Image: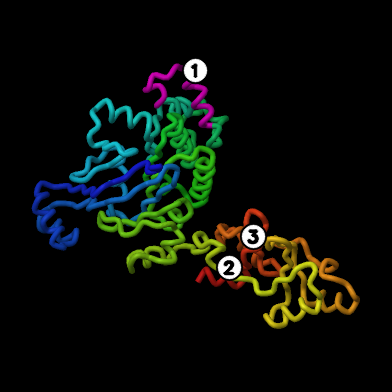
Amino acid sequence: MNNIMLSTKNVSKLYGSEKAKAIKLKESGADKDTIYKKTGVVIALWDVTLDIKEGEVFVIIGLSGSGKSTLVRCFNMLNKPTSGKIYYRDKDIGKFNKKELNDYRRNQVSMIFQQFGLMSHRDVLGNVAYGLEVKGVPKKECHDKAEEMLSMVGLGDHGHEPITSLSGGMKQRVGIARALANDPEILLMDEPFSALDPLVRMDMQFELLTIQEKLDKTIVFITHDINEAFKLGDRVAIMKDGEIIQVATPEEMSDNPADDYVKQFIDSADKTQVVTVKSVMITPNSIVRPGDSLMYAINIMRSNDVSSAYVVGDRMKLLGVITIDDTIRANREGLGIKDILIRDVNTTSPDTVLTDIMSMATKSPFPIAVVDEKGSLKGIVSKVHVLSSML
């Protein structure tokens, strides 16, 4: 099944009159600045080809002038490409007639801007309901849907307040509610949080992830902040001078940057926000079963130069941990592994990002056990693994 929601094929966007001359220079290897000096033509996008999957958060990141905002505006034809094609579910939107394009913009895609784009003469509820009114939705249905969306973004009690009374973060929530009210398949978000202060920005990032978990929209998110990109994106595209340099998951990009530009770009990223447990976990060598002898457990810990062992049952299901001190004491007293088993053990899943277990790792007396959804032991991750990943 084709799950591609949006795609671009060899999309270029040039501004200026001498486009043909600029294209020849570009094809001969000239850079963006040289082309502008010789022709006055700005190459905003060049030969961009990518696929955006249904239901994913696809983040496009780049410095000012990289072409990211130009590209996102091509997805709703606010910018028409000089060449190349934009597809929505395999339909070439460049071939849409006026009615088809209006229907696409009203029903399939919504855009959220950095500066909110709200109407000061309408109250909060009126702003959220505006798109529905334009579509001719009955008044009561507009009202009910707008209230539902306001509740979803945490503004259920603010419907009749004037827009001017809201903080920046609240205004952006109204913008998101308005975009969601039309129930679009696609949200285009052009640096929506960059004007907000850091704490409000973090709240809005969390809010967006929460909404996405509930609604499962296809989101194209523009940012210049690598930490924001890695936090929000299922996949991330890095742009430079109108071109796509690399498309990958945050973890893939962090582990295997395409070139020095990408490496330099992400060097400032908080790696613990990207790297998952499965990337740093190791295989536990000290594993025993409830029926093993205590001397066997002691020898296992001694041979691996560790002070604890993980106890597993059938299908490697984690039962708990035993320590060398308890094992030696129990051996003297004629006890068994079950008598000294510590069942209250910190665990995590392989797909957990390291930042989520930072506190746990610093406090845990044992390496954290990594288990799958069935509780089977897959590996262990220690404090040193977590802390060294930050370097």
Q: Secondary structure at mark 3?
A: strand
Look at 55% across and 59% down and name the residue there: 353
Q: Is residue 134 magenta?
A: yes
Residue 363, above or below 88: below
On the rendered structure, is 63 left or right of 155?
A: left
**Which quadrant, please, contains the N terminus?**
top left
- Looking at the rendering, the stretch of residues picked out in magenta corresponds to 131-150
Mark carried by residue 209: none
The residue nearer to you, when weighing 304 against 45, is: 304
Looking at the image, tell me whether mark 1 or mark 3 is earlier in sequence order.
Answer: 1
Task: Determine which quarter of the picture holds residue 373.
Answer: bottom right
Kind of residue at disc 2: Met
The residue to which callout 1 is attached is 140
Q: Which residue is mark 3?
A: 371
Residue 305 at what x, y percent from top left? 68, 81
Viewer-nearest residue: 83 or 147? 83
Taking 150 as reference, is 112 left or right?
left
- The residue type indicated by label 3 comes to Val
**How busy is the neighbourhood of tag 3: few (under 14 within 10 Å), some, or many (20 plus)?**
some
Q: Residue 140, how many percent across, how many down?
A: 49, 17
| Majority secondary structure of magenta residues | helix
Badge 2 marks a residue whose secondary structure is: loop
Q: Is residue 179 visible?
A: yes
- Report the disc number at residue 281: 2
Q: Mark 3 and mark 1 in contact (Cβ < 8 Å)?
A: no
- In the displayed structure, does residue 350 sit left or right of residue 236? right
- Is residue 25 within the magenta segment? no
